[in-house]
Image (tube, helix red, strand yellow):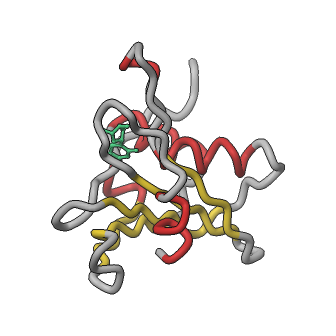
Amino acid sequence: MTAAIKARERAVAPYSKFKVGAAVLTRAGKIIGGANVESASYGLTCCAERVALFKALTEGENDFIAVAVAARTDGGAMPCGACRQLLAEYARQAQVFVADSRRPRQIKAFTVRELLPGAFLTVP
Ligand code: THU
């Protein structure tokens, strides 16, 4: 969670002003952070979770055991549907931890499976 809170400082959120940080932890102990990046064409915005995941994947990591998400809102921000899909595909074994960045020890934990039951995982 500390890494997610740190990553949040680099969010590029000029439209919503809602900064989110995420960090993925590999089985080998490597932590890779990311933050949301917004676009004037709003739909192009990429969430913190996907930025962290894409950074890690393109650095050659593919074995993730945890994902932390930090945002300044009561209870923290739950991953959106798009992020759940990507986590189901590339971080299926990971635990997902969510917290309000102001209360980093109050953490909610989820499995990726419970966040997206019945995920679409293979193209027929
Ligand atoms: N956002 C994230 O980065 N992660 C979440 O889990 C929820 C939403 C971002 C996307 C957008 O930049 C802003 O929060 C408002 O939706």
Q: Hey, which residue is sitting farthest top in the picture?
A: 41
**Residue drawn at 21 percent across, 60 percent down:** 73
Q: Please provide percent x and percent y for residue 117.
A: 33, 47
Image quarter of the C terminus: top right
Question: In the rendered image of this protein, does residue 52 appear above or below residue 108?
Answer: above
Which residue is situated farthest in the left direction here? 74
Q: Residue at coordinates 70% horizontally, 73% vertically from top-left? A: 27
Residue pictured at 58% horizontal, 52% vertical: 34
Q: Nearer the viewer, residue 118 or 96?
A: 96
Residue 99: x percent and y percent? 31, 70
**In the image: residue 72, left or right of residue 88:** left
Residue 116 lies, with reference to residue 46, above or below; the image says below
State the image coordinates of residue 89 (x, y, percent, origin top left). 56, 42
User: Residue at horizontal 33%, vertical 59%?
Assistant: 71
Residue 9 is situated, as x and y percent measured from the top left of the image, at 49, 58
Image quadrant in which you'd find residue 61: bottom right
Question: Is 45 located above or below residue 80 in the figure?
Answer: above
Q: Quadrant of ligand 1?
A: top left
